[in-house]
Image: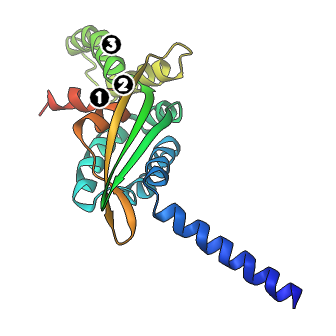
Amino acid sequence: MKKFLSVLLIIVLVFSMTACAKSDPKASVSGYLDALKSGNIEEMNKYVKSDSEDQVKEVFNNENQMNEEAFLKAYSKLDYKILSSKVNGDTATVETEINAPNLGKIMTELIQEALPLAFAAAFKEDKSEDNMDDLMNTMLLDKVNSDDMPMVKKTVKIDLVKENNNWIINPSNDFTNAITGNLADMSKLFK
């Protein structure tokens, strides 16, 4: 009988902890940011409004085309601290301090350094685009592997909505910029 009660108590505790995690906006924000740090886009999409998935995928798929290894390394250095959470019915706001690699600055520096090399390569007989791509990828990887990689710290209010008893992030421009280190704003210049 004691064994049966112990097992029953463990099952009740496990289910109650699982229910709390699903109904806590802070857990959704942590889940998303932890998935970002590990480079798990599928897991990230579980925490984002379905009509926002395309926006998130577009930002990260563009980055992955350039150099997946570099961006995985950069995002592994992301750090965050949840400051507060406010629930109002089926909406919530989680104020979070995000310290992310300043990818906007890194990409700006990379373009400035690579542009003269691209012009020089354009006048050579061997105009291999692959060589330039490899050089850009190597330069990017060197920048994110650097001990003094620039970081940018922002405090953002992350909006969430409750859908099917789960808190889902409704990403804003401020949030997207915070997690991409201003790269989201920079990418708008090229559209």
Q: Which residue is under mark 1? A: 183
Task: Indicate the amino acid at tag 3.
Answer: Glu
Is 136 in front, or is 55?
Answer: 55
Task: Examine the rendered structure and indicate whether residue 101 appears above or below residue 1.
Answer: above
Q: Residue at x 80, y 85 (%)?
A: 5
Q: Reading the chain from its start, which is encountered first: label 3 or label 1?
A: 3
Is 175 in front, or is 92?
Answer: 92
Q: How far across and down, in percent of the image, does residue 10 sit? A: 74, 75
Q: Reading the chain from its start, which is encountered first: label 3 or label 2?
A: 2
How packed mark 1 is, by other alpha carbons closer than 10 Å (few <14, some 14-19, many 20 or more), is many
Task: Examine the rendered structure and indicate whether residue 24 appears above or below residue 159.
Answer: below
Is 102 in front, or is 70?
Answer: 102
Q: Residue at x 21, y 11 (%)?
A: 119
Task: Indicate the amino acid at tag 1.
Answer: Leu
Is 182 in front, or is 40?
Answer: 182
How packed mark 2 is, by other alpha carbons closer than 10 Å (few <14, some 14-19, many 20 or more), is many
